[in-house]
């Protein structure tokens, strides 16, 4: 009996000591929390022991600022890391620290979550993106085919094109140039003037200005008429009213052979070329002859005449099998100027208009 009494006294003393120790620890933690600026967060961990279930305090991590939708977060902390105890029974934040190079993005004072700051937002995220360039919006980056440029809205009746589109004039090129050829300053400018003059006179016209050396893969000069023939075929298929086909060139003769003065102004002389290797060559020659005669009647000496090429001499077809009113037109020579050629283009437009209106072609 004395043994049992002693056992109860020892158990009571142990229990009292345990309670006293628990109270001392609680007071100690409270004093530490009051005297230390660190914020403590309650993390519940159930531990089996003599005193039953205890609540331990664990210092909360220093917040590393990042922003997600305007809400301040502790990086790496989620529900799983807050509640998952480690082997010692304490809950730990287990997320790895972010890379040193990842700097937190601080929001502008004026920025709100639902109204992004246009100054810092990508251009495609702003309410008013920059206006697109008008030119790039209308011109395709890689056109499948260089379409003819129509000057008139009415169905064109005249096609102006250029088999040798880079033929140019020495006076218009840099001094010392050996070859009268240019990608930009060339007979297409004369063709543009002719097309515009026809339009002003009431004859709907279009000009094809394709630069074959750059648009044709593996361009070969010897096949120039093959390339331009496809241009004419396409134009005819798209414009059923086309009546006159004028292939504008520049001759290789010198100035004394290709220039004439009329009423105090210099004009580039004109020459019509007909190929006899086509079924329409007589009709084409008749058309050229009418233009030659009418031109010289009003502009004495401006036309050098009509040159015919027999089969076996040169191309001798010149796309003239496609129409009874198809011509090669040589506008001046290598030593003429654009101004002189423009005058001749105006003269040709006036005569073609006159003959067309009078039903003579």
Image: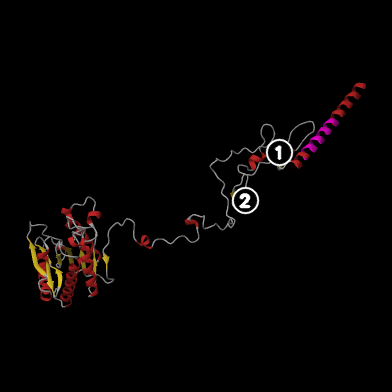
Element assignment for label 1? strand
Residue 248 counted in the magenta span:
no
Residue toward you, 201 or 101: 101
Which is the main secondary structure of the residues drawn in magenta? helix
Q: Which of the 4 image quadrants contains residue 330? A: bottom left
Give the x, y percent position of residue 340: 17, 68
In the rendered image, the quadrant that contains the N terminus is top right
Q: Which of the 4 image quadrants contains residue 98? A: top right
Relative to 60, residue 290 above or below = below
Category of crowding for the residue at label 2, using alpha-carbon neighbours closer than 10 angstroms: few (below 14), some (14–19), many (at least 20):
few
Q: Residue at image x 75%, y 41%? A: 35
Q: Which of the 4 image quadrants contains residue 297? A: bottom left
Q: Is residue 172 left or right of residue 34?
A: left
Q: In the rendered structure, which segment of residues is drawn in magenta?
A: 16-30
Element assignment for label 2? strand
Q: Residue at image x 10%, y 57%? A: 314
- Which mark is drawn over residue 71? 2
Q: Residue at image x 18%, y 62%? A: 171
Give the x, y percent position of residue 53: 77, 36
Relative to 317, residue 41 above or below = above
* Total number of numbered discs in the rendering: 2
Q: Which residue is mark 1?
A: 58
- Which mark is drawn over residue 84? none
Give the x, y percent position of residue 145: 28, 58
Q: Is residue 192 left or right of residue 290?
A: right
3D distance between C-alphas at marks 1 and 2? 24 Å
Q: Is residue 115 left or right of residue 92?
A: left
The outermost residue toward the bottom is 358
In the rendered image, the quadrant that contains the C terminus is bottom left
């Amino acid at each position: 009996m004395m043994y049992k009494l002693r056992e109860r006294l020892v158990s009571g003393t142990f229990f009292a000591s345990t309670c006293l120790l628990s109270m001392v620890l609680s007071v100690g933690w409270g004093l530490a929390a009051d005297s230390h600026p660190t914020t403590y967060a309650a993390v519940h961990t159930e531990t089996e022991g003599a005193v039953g279930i205890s609540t331990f305090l664990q210092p909360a991590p220093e917040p590393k600022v990042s922003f997600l939708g305007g809400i301040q977060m502790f990086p790496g902390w989620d529900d799983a890391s807050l509640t998952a105890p480690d082997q010692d029974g304490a809950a730990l934040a287990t997320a790895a620290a972010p890379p040193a190079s990842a700097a937190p993005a601080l929001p502008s004072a004026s920025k709100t979550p639902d109204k992004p700051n246009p100054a810092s937002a990508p251009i495609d995220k702003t309410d008013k993106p920059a206006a697109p360039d008008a030119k790039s919006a209308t011109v395709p980056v890689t056109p499948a085919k260089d379409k003819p440029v129509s000057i008139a809205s009415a169905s064109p009746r005249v096609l102006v094109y250029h088999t040798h589109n880079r033929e140019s004039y020495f006076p218009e090129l840099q001094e010392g140039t050996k070859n009268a050829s240019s990608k930009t300053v060339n007979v297409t400018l004369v063709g543009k003037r002719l097309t515009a003059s026809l339009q002003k006179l009431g004859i709907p016209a279009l000009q094809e200005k394709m630069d074959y050396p750059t648009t044709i893969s593996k361009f070969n000069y010897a096949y120039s008429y093959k390339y331009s023939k496809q241009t004419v075929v396409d134009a005819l298929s798209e414009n059923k009213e086309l009546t006159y086909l004028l292939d504008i060139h520049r001759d290789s003769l010198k100035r004394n052979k290709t220039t004439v003065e009329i009423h105090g102004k210099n004009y580039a002389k004109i020459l019509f070329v007909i190929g006899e290797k086509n079924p329409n060559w007589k009709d084409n020659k008749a058309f050229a002859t009418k233009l030659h005669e009418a031109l010289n009647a009003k502009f004495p000496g401006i036309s050098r005449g009509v040159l015919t090429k027999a089969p076996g001499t040169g191309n001798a077809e010149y796309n003239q099998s496609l129409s009874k009113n198809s011509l090669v037109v040589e506008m001046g020579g290598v030593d003429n100027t654009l101004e002189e050629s423009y005058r001749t283009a105006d003269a040709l437009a006036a005569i073609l208009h006159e003959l067309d209106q009078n039903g003579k072609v």
